[in-house]
Amino acid sequence: MTSRTLGQLREGIEAVASMDGDYVVGCARTGARPSPVAGRRFPSRHAAAVAARLAGHYRAWLRRYDPETAVYDLVVCDPSRAASDRPSSDDHGVGVRGTR
C-alpha cells in the first residue's frame, strides 16, 4: 500500500478525471461505482486505470479503520460501447484489481 493520505489519493483521482470522459470505473461483479470514483469520468483507459488503482488503495485505507468497508473488484469500462453504464467482463472492460 502507498503511504499517501486519503486526501492525496482523492486528489490523484481528481487529477486524471474529466467532465466528459468516455470511461468510468466500477465493480466487475456488481456494477457499483463506489467512492471515490462514483460519478467521475476519465478521458482514457490509462487515466481510468490509474483512478481504479488509486481507488483500490483508498478503499484499503478505509478498511484499516472500518473492516466492514466493502471490497470491490474495480475495472475500467467504456460505457459508450457497453450495453449499460455497468462494467462488463468482455472486451469493453480492462481489469484492474483493487488492493484488498
Image (spheres, grey):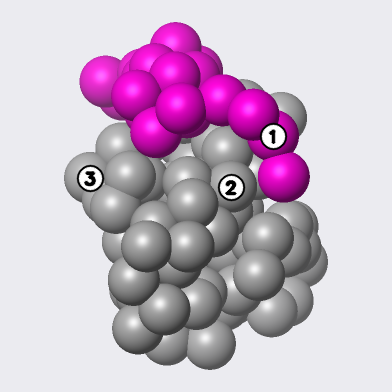
Task: Give the distance between the C-alpha atoms of the residues marked 1 and 3, in whole angstroms.
Answer: 24 Å
Drawn side of residue 97 relative to residue 27, left or right: right
Mark sitting earlier along the chain (1/3): 1
Instruction: Say which of 62 and 41 sits in front.
Output: 62
Q: Which residue is mark 1?
A: 2
**Mark 2 is on which residue type?**
His
Quadrant of residue 93 in the image? bottom right
Task: Give the distance between the C-alpha atoms of the residues marked 1 and 2, in whole angstroms.
Answer: 7 Å
Q: Position of residue 49 (x, y in %)?
A: 67, 40
Task: Judge whether residue 78 can be spotted in this image.
Answer: no
Instruction: Say which of 76 and 66 sits in front.
Output: 66
Query: Which segment is the magenta one?
Result: 1-21
Q: Nearer the viewer, mark 1 or mark 3?
A: 1
Task: Give the distance between the C-alpha atoms of the residues marked 2 and 3, in whole angstroms.
Answer: 18 Å
Q: Quadrant of the C terminus?
A: bottom right
Quadrant of residue 86 in the image? bottom left
Q: Is residue 66 above or below residue 35?
A: below
Q: What label does residue 39 carry, if any?
A: 3
**Element class at badge 3:** loop
Q: What label does residue 57 carry, if any?
A: 2
